[in-house]
Image (cartoon, rainbow, N blue to C red):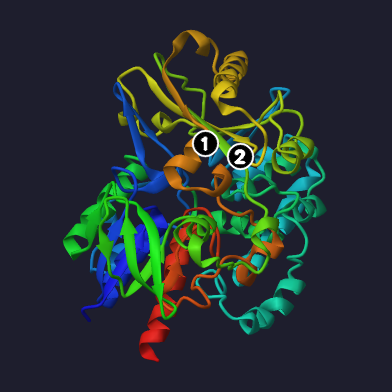
Amino acid sequence: MNKKAIVIGSGFGGIAISLRLKKLGYDTTIIEKLDSLGGRARVFEVNGFRHDAGPTVITAPFLFDELFNLFGKKREDYLNFVPLEPWYRYYFHDGRTFDYCSTIEKTNDQIRKFDQRDVKGYSKLLHQSKKIFDVGFTKLADKPFISFFKMLGVIPNLIILKSYLTVSQIVNSYLKNPYLRKAFSIHPLLVGGDPHTTTSIYALIHYLERKWGVFFCMGGTGKIVTELKKLMIESGIKIKTKTEAKEFVLKDNKITKIITNKGEIINPDLVVCNGDPPMIYSKLLKKYNLSRPVIKEKKLLYSMGLFVLFFGTKKQYNNVAHHTIWMTERFKSLLNDIFKNKILSEDFSLYIHRPTATDKSFAPEGCDSFYVLCPVPNLQGNVNWDTESEHLKNKIVKELSRTIMPDLEETITDVFWMNPNDFKNDYNSMHGAGFSIAPIFTQSAWFRYHNKDKKIKNLYFSAAGSHPGAGIPGVLSSAKVVENIIKAELNH
């Protein structure tokens, strides 16, 4: 159709919408601030150790299948998704463990170690999760919420499903054991939310995992980016790295010019932002003094920050699972310190990724590759990361050495990290938040940043901060939302 589409940001949401726009016939260009594609899914390589920088858990694999199917190809010919067992291993403060497994039977065996009564409770939780999934994911995840009347139409369903409750409240209503309550409430943290404030809509993740499973892509998420890049090039999408949008120029409520860090002027017909929506409005549209979210920007609640520790080990820790959730004794009060009080506590909980449990190519022979993700306050807190990063790194290594990774202090090598300052600087993330705005009820669906701006006629969002939210299924679904909006406009 000879119309020019510009996609800003090359995370999974940006890559996905680029491919969908190209299939619609747009002359599509994607621009990326960093020197490689992927955004948070970039890859670090240090002395033979490879690290996926961001997402590692693959669920809803059909969303990747769709991108290859657009061009008559099969994802299986490019990417090998292997199922994990267990999905996650929980390590609690007193040394007890819980394996969240790929079958209900195995999971029930694990539940019985803590409380036989919760086997029935887990069954009821899954049943409720399916009901939420059937509405929250199947019916709403790829539907646009740019009209308040659209939101009104689904409110009765949301009320019936008790979406005004939190994930923690839903889980606690079915499970009694305090360890299991923690384990089954953890999912909102994977998309940037405190389980005690995140809308129970996100309890659908329980059923989503049961429906499709939990996978790892051989070669990592970086391999997914590499193969999608090949697909983009084959389909004729133009890719510009080390290129950052610095300003939008508006005329007649349309973006007519994008000015880049290189002084280049791009004239788009439409613009899709994969970047953080609040940063887009506060930086690229600053002089127009626009305010977009339903909740005033100064009252928005943001996700936590992330301290991500990357390292190799000179030996293998074969007893450490692919995914481990390492939990301190505190749960609710720790999360309250992170999300509300915004203070860096002496204790912490961790998500540990050991890709070499599945794919030995991530490390030299006889070695392991790790990243350890620690939820921390975002930059709205008063934490001096120039000094605290080293201190936190030392505490994490000491605790892991004391518990599940003996002698880590002697075997660790090639250490580096990212803190909330890096998320702000590298990813243009407001307040260095790991997942944009938090997934509370009043920041979901219509209340979240809309996938199309209500005044700027050619500005769209396929990003974690827009509907339906963060996480790989969220941003890939966000691209489908934008595609559906544009299709409707083309038909009109």
Extreme-front residue of the structure: 287
| Of residues 426 and 345, the one drawn nearer to the viewer in this rendering | 426
Q: Quick check: can you spot residue 328?
A: yes
| Of residues 254 and 157, the one drawn nearer to the viewer in this rendering | 254
Report which quarter residue 20 is drawn in: bottom left
| Other residues around mark 2 within 10 Å, as few (<14) / some (14–19) / many (≥20) | many
Indicate the position of residue 84 as horizontal and vertical percent values: 46, 42
Q: In this view, does 458 lie to the left or right of 153?
A: left
Q: Provide the residue designation for mark 2.
A: 379
Name the residue rendered at 78%, 48% in the picture.
Answer: 175
Name the residue rendered at 56%, 39% in the picture.
Answer: 88
Q: In this view, does 170 lie to the left or right of 246?
A: right
Dot 1: element: helix
Q: Quick check: can you spot residue 216?
A: no
Q: In which quarter of the image is the N terminus?
A: bottom left
Tag shown at residue 421: 1
Q: Is residue 283 left or right of residue 374?
A: left
Indicate the position of residue 198 as horizontal and vertical percent values: 70, 54
